[in-house]
């Protein structure tokens, strides 16, 4: 993992190295390190704005961050993240479903 991060740091615009973003992002996401995974995917999208795969990964990373926030009881933060996810991809149905669930939880859970 450290070697991948160093490769990105050395030359983030190099095409072979840009593929490393996927590996680092996926590894971080699998470990539940959502904030870092999102940063990696954001870098990838910034470097290659027309890369649909990178945008999809960024959308999924935000969605999973929202799910993790719900698990931690941070419903208001999850709602914000789900809304951001839908800004990235308005057609991403899982985020819409989970946004509605989070809004329901907030409405029905006493403070």
Image (cartoon, rainbow, N blue to C red):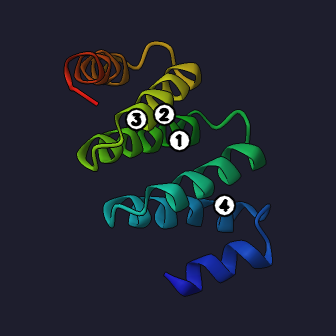
User: Camera-side residue: 90 or 18?
Assistant: 90
Q: Is residue 95 above or below residue 77?
A: above
- Residue position marked by numbered label 3 in the rendering: 78
- Badge 1 is on which residue? 58
Report, in whole angstroms, how far the alpha carbon at label 2 lies from the one at label 4: 26 Å
| Residue shown at the point (57%, 66%) measured from the top left | 20
Estimate the x, y position of residue 97 in percent, counting from the top left.
Answer: 28, 17
Q: Alpha-carbon distance for marks 4 and 1?
A: 15 Å
Can you tell which of label 3 and label 4 is closer to the viewer?
3
> Does residue 69 lie above or below 104 as drawn?
below
**Which of label 1 and label 2 is nearer to you?**
2
What separation in Å lies between label 3 and label 2 (alpha carbons)?
A: 5 Å
Question: Is 18 in front, or is 82?
Answer: 82
Q: Nearer the viewer, mark 2 or mark 4?
A: 2
What's the distance in space between the residues labelled 1 and 2, CA to CA? 12 Å
In the image, 20 versus 90, the foreground residue is: 90
Q: Residue at x 49, y 35 (%)?
A: 59
Nearer the observer, disc 3 or disc 1?
Answer: 3
Disc 3 and disc 2 in contact, CB within 8 angstroms: yes
């Amino acid at each position: 993992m450290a070697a991948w991060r160093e490769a990105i740091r050395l030359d983030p615009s190099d095409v072979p190295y840009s593929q490393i973003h996927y590996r680092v992002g996926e590894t971080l996401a699998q470990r539940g390190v959502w904030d870092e995974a999102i940063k990696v995917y954001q870098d990838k999208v910034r470097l290659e704005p027309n890369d649909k795969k990178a945008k999809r990964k960024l959308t999924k990373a935000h969605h999973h961050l929202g799910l993790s926030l719900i698990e931690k009881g941070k419903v208001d933060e999850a709602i914000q993240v789900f809304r951001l996810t839908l800004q990235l991809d308005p057609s991403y149905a899982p985020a819409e479903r989970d946004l509605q669930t989070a809004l329901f939880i907030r409405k029905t859970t006493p403070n």
